[in-house]
Structures are given as structure tokens and as C-alpha cells.
């Protein structure tokens, strides 16, 4: 079968044959997975693909808790700027472009962390960023940005839509969003298609950062598989929710040592705002003294991406 495929490829390059339909592997055929038709986007030249992408308005859900670039001094915005700075520094030292954001268990805040990190990266001029929802089991990214779930990644992988149709650009930003797509009954089998590896290899030529949301490590093997295909993994843990045992088991479940760091989530909003307001607002000396005394009784924030406890998964 591979020799036939190679012969068809050679014929295509010489102009003797149109791009072939990629035949599914027997294992994926038995699992109900249909391999996609080879498309121009997956060829060597991707330069014009983003020009074909549809632009959609920036309309977020009222309860999405996404950071707001118009309020740059709010505590959550500053926290994700800190995370962005650390990742960009790491990128200057080693080739990191694709990052999986996951957690040990559900309801840790991984989806919101992925979305806010992507927004923070996209706020930098020229920092083209893709937020991809690879949580096919319980996708949330499309809801946060008020876009349709389909067409999305699963539709592309099953040959139902070309790549430029499953990517949306958020108007007025450098952020592109790739929703999960139509529901599938075999997400792990879908992620095992070689087209996923091809996609991961090509996306960095289009985007400075590719941030991927994925299912929790201890509830599905999807994040483990994605971690082997990407440059790094961020593990989100939630204060008062994640146990040391679950973090240990989650770290042990990863197939390689590409963990970039742990994002601690869930600090109370009041603790953060009292500190950040001190540095980003004007006070009289009397107000400074009063606030200094009030802050001494508050615990230090222990992480990045903290909110008031209303985080979604």
C-alpha cells in the first residue's frame, strides 16, 4: 500500500495526476474513522492560507471570564502577561511553538487558562496565535468566543472541511481560533491519524504560538498523545481542588519530559486586586499607609491565572 501511495505522489508532482484521496489505515477504518482528502493547505506552500480564513466579531460570553485588553492593569491580565513573558523567554532559548494545556482532573480551569494565555500572546504586535480546541469530549472554546463548534478540527480530520474553513480569525486581534468540530465517538482513534502529526508539523509555519486545550490527563489518554506531538505541556492545578496525588499521577502519565511548568489557578480575586491596585493607581501617603497595613494580613498569591473561583474547565 505504501509503494502505491508513493507512486501516486510522484505522479502528482509530475502533473500526471490530481491530488489523491488518502486511503484510511485498516485500523482506523474498523474504528469508523475516515481519513481526509489530501488538500492544498497541507502541501508545502501555506503562505496564502490565512488570507482565506473567515474573520468573526470579538463577542465573548458574559460569564466567560476572559481577560480584557482594554483593562490592562487588572490582576488576571497581569498574571497571564507574566505567564506569557516566561513562555516567550523559553521560546528564545529553545524551539517552542506548540503547547498543550491540560490538567489532572476536570474543573481545574484548563480551558480558560488556554484561552487567556492565547489572548495574552495575541496582544503582542505581530504575535500571530492559534487557539485550538483538541478537547473533542467536552469542548468549551467555541462557547467562550461565541462561534460555531462546527466546522472544526474533527471535520478537517475526517475530510468534511478544508483547513481554512475550520479556522476563524477574531476581528481586531492576532488571535485565530480552531474549534473542536462535530462530535465524534472515537476521539483517541482520530488523534492517532497521521494527519494530526502532519497538522502539528505545519501549524508553526503559520503561527508564532499554537495553544491547545485538551482533556484531563487522568480521564482520557488524549492529552498524553498530544503531548508527544507538541513542543511542551502546561499543567493547570487548582488551589483547594487538586490533590498532590493527582498531580503526581498526572505527571507520571506523560510519555515524555516536555512539561514546561505548572499553572496554579483559583486564588481569590480580592487577594489579587488589593495588591495590583496598589501599583497601578494613585494614592495619597495616608492611603498608602492604610493599604500597607491591610495587605500585611493577606496571603501571597500562589500562581498564574487566578480568578474568583468561578473558573470553567
Image: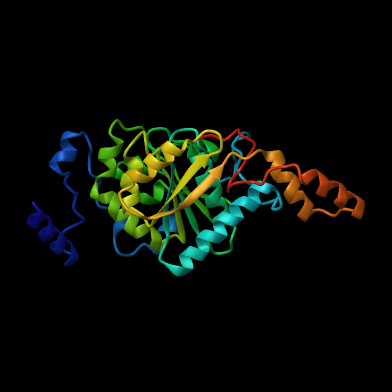
Q: Residue at x 64, y 50 (%)?
A: 77
Location of residue 102 with respect to 31 vertically, above or below: below
Number of on-image labels: 0
Nearer to me, 218 or 63: 218
Res 167 seen here: yes
Is 50 on the left-hand or right-hand side of 295?
Answer: left
Query: Taking 72 as reference, is 45 above or below it?
Result: below
Image location of residue 39, percent across then percent down: 28, 53
In the image, taking residue 134 as reference, residue 281 lies left or right, namely: right
Seen at 31% across and 41% down, the residue is 160
Instruction: Describe residue 203's horizontal placement relative to residue 297 as left or right.
Output: left
Residue 174 location in percent, x, y?
A: 54, 56
Q: Position of residue 303 (x, y in %)?
A: 58, 47
**Residue 137 occupies which quadrant of the picture?**
top left
Seen from the viewer's position, the closer of residues 285 and 170 is 285
Q: Residue furthest top?
A: 185
Q: Which residue appears at 70% of the width and 42% of the height?
A: 271
- Residue 184 image position (x, y, % from top left): 32, 33
- Residue 310 or residue 241, whichever sits in front: 241
| Location of residue 138 (image quadrant) | top left
Residue occupying the point 87% across, 47% down = 290
55 or 284: nearer the viewer:
284
Residue at the bottom extreme, as displayed: 93
Residue 152 in view in this figure:
no
Q: How is the image coloured?
A: rainbow
Amino acid at each position: 500500500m505504501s509503494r502505491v501511495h508513493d507512486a501516486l505522489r510522484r505522479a502528482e508532482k509530475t502533473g500526471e495526476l490530481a491530488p489523491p484521496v488518502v486511503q484510511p489505515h485498516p485500523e482506523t477504518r474498523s474504528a469508523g474513522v475516515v481519513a481526509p482528502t489530501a488538500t492544498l493547505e497541507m502541501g508545502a506552500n501555506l503562505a496564502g492560507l490565512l488570507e482565506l480564513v473567515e474573520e468573526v466579531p470579538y463577542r465573548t460570553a458574559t460569564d466567560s471570564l476572559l481577560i480584557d485588553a482594554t483593562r490592562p492593569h487588572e490582576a488576571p491580565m497581569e498574571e497571564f502577561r507574566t505567564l506569557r513573558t516566561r513562555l516567550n523567554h523559553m521560546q528564545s532559548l529553545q524551539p517552542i511553538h506548540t503547547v498543550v494545556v491540560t490538567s489532572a482532573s476536570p474543573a481545574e480551569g484548563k480551558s480558560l487558562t488556554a484561552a487567556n494565555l492565547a489572548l495574552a500572546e495575541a496582544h503582542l504586535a505581530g504575535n500571530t496565535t492559534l487557539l485550538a480546541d483538541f478537547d473533542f469530549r467536552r469542548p468549551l472554546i467555541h462557547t467562550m468566543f461565541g462561534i460555531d463548534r462546527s466546522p472544526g478540527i474533527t471535520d478537517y480530520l475526517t475530510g468534511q472541511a478544508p483547513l481554512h474553513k475550520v479556522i476563524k480569525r477574531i476581528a481586531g486581534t492576532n488571535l485565530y481560533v480552531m474549534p473542536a468540530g462535530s462530535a465524534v465517538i472515537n476521539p483517541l482513534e482520530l488523534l492517532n491519524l497521521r494527519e494530526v502529526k502532519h497538522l502539528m508539523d505545519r501549524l508553526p509555519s503559520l503561527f508564532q504560538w499554537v495553544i491547545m486545550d485538551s482533556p484531563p490527563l487522568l480521564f482520557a489518554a488524549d492529552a498524553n498523545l498530544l503531548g508527544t506531538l507538541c513542543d511542551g505541556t502546561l499543567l493547570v492545578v487548582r488551589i483547594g481542588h487538586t490533590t498532590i496525588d493527582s498531580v503526581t499521577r498526572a505527571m507520571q502519565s506523560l510519555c515524555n519530559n516536555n512539561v514546561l511548568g505548572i499553572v496554579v489557578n483559583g486564588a481569590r480575586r480580592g487577594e489579587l486586586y488589593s495588591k495590583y491596585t496598589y501599583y497601578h493607581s494613585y494614592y495619597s501617603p495616608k492611603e498608602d499607609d492604610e493599604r500597607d497595613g491591610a495587605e500585611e494580613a493577606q496571603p501571597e498569591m500562589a500562581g498564574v491565572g487566578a480568578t474568583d473561583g468561578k473558573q470553567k474547565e
